[in-house]
Amino acid sequence: MRWLASGTAALILAGLILAGLILGTACSGSPASNSTATTIDFWYVPTGAQPDQYFQDAAKSFHAQHPNIEVKGTKIASGDAYTKMHSALTGAGAGGPDVMQVDMSWVGAFAATGAMREFTADDVQNLGGSTAFVPAAWSTSAAFNTGKITAIPWFIDTRAIYYRTDILKQVGIDPADGFKDWEALDHTLEAIRASGKIAPLGIPGKNDASVVASFAPWIWEAGGSLMSDDGTRPTINQPAAVDGVDEYQRFGGKYVDPGVLQRTNTEVESMFAAGKFAVTIAGPSLALKLQGQQFGVQQFPNGHAGHVVYLGGSDLAIRKSSPRATQAYEWVRWLVSSAGQTTYVKKTGMYPALVAAAPEVRAAPNTAADAKPDGAAKPPATGTKADAAARILGKSYLGTLAKVREMYASRRYELALVELVDLEASHPKDARLQAMKGSVYLKLGKAQLARESWQKALALDPEDPAVAEALRTLKEE
């Protein structure tokens, strides 16, 4: 999902600073059981430093208001969440949740299963109506072009520039100017590197948990897109999109230590908090780790084609087959209410999707943020309907490929194949997917299927020497 960083985007930016100033403050668990209460199962993905505690506190608060309903929490690892939730919806897995925390980019794919409960107009009105939510977040509540509301926005995640205020002061750079566009960012990082005081930049590379969230702003700000406006074909291979990818990779190659590029997002954030480098790009949860430290936040720098930011986060969905849909809806209603947004969401460090739950924002030192919580956010004029990765396809192309590589490296070949087959449905003529399928089939001992996939890959891209060599080797064996 992409949108201009005016209105709500600026509000979120200021909220990052406030998060660092006002938030004080292992396995999943639930409150003590009441035998007369109905128990619903909530699948959640760990967010924030103490996700289990956040859930348990919320479940207790909810139960105090709804003594006839108890919530059992099941924590799902982020790397397995899509596969497990999709299996629960399609009946491929045993049991299933009543309510799920769904990544905004998965709504399209999950809705396509037909197994998500549709929220009626009355349901939405009882939540405050669609206008009660940040508009850009609400646009993820339905699969592209369907109008069927199958998810409710819960919290928002986006990216901003975090920097060490003391370092910028030492190198004589005004933060308001030092991060205003790509050229200014390059100049700032070069000045920090030349000072020899500290490494200039830290960002994750091969273990980035959200490749699309990292690359998309650069692609859009270069004038490119991930998908066509109607969401029917990928455009990631177009010159402008490639330029955006190259720009991001150039910054990483020029200013980031190779060892840092091997780290996860969490590790990179911890390294920044520990003073290992002067600048990083991260979401709102990082502010929680920086309390009491000298740091500032600036909006994402402008690119050659303007200023566009990535909107991520999570929605809440109810499984259609849940026999406890009424109780599940009450849990969703509490989570997206001011009570849930100002407690549960606030603790995670994310930004609330409910406009009324946004903190009163005032201009903060060391930042250019000066916004009011009006909930305004407009998609860019070139709009991509959330770039199909977040609407029709429900999952990102680049993000899925990264997940498949991780599964392949950890020898989870069956899960890797599920991801590839799912992605192939929307990219039937993608040579890379066919090549990867061949490699997975070979690891599963299915030589004939590997051969067929590689033959398809070579037919789509006759110039791929790796696939040609794989076929020759397979034939010799």
Image (tube, helix red, strand yellow):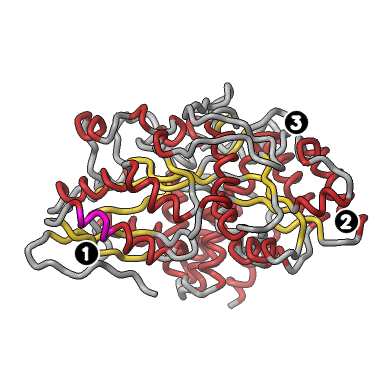
Mark 2 or mark 3: name the one nearer the start of the chain: 2
- Residue 397 — which label? none
Q: Position of residue 353 (x, y in %)?
A: 42, 40
Question: Tag 3: Cα neighbours inside 10 Å, few (<14), some, or many (≥20)?
Answer: some
- The residue that label 3 is drawn on is 304
Residue 378 colored magenta?
no
Q: Position of residue 402 (x, y in %)?
A: 57, 58
Q: Is residue 112 above or below residue 198?
A: above
- The residue that label 2 is drawn on is 193
| Residue at the (61%, 65%) spot, across then down | 264
Q: Position of residue 16 (x, y in %)?
A: 57, 46
Q: Main secondary structure of the magenta part?
A: helix
Q: Secondary structure at mark 1?
A: loop
- Mark 1 or 2: in front is 2
Q: CA distance from mark 1 to mark 3?
A: 49 Å
Q: Nearer the viewer, residue 302 or 396?
A: 302
| Residue at the (31%, 48%) spot, across then down | 335
| Residue at the (26%, 33%) spot, across then down | 124
Q: Secondary structure at mark 3?
A: loop
- Residue 95 — which label? 1
- For badge 2, the amino acid type reads Arg
Q: Nearer the viewer, residue 1 or 292?
A: 292
User: Residue at the left extreme?
Assistant: 36
Q: Which residues are magenta?
A: 59-64
Q: Is residue 180 left or right of residue 340?
A: right
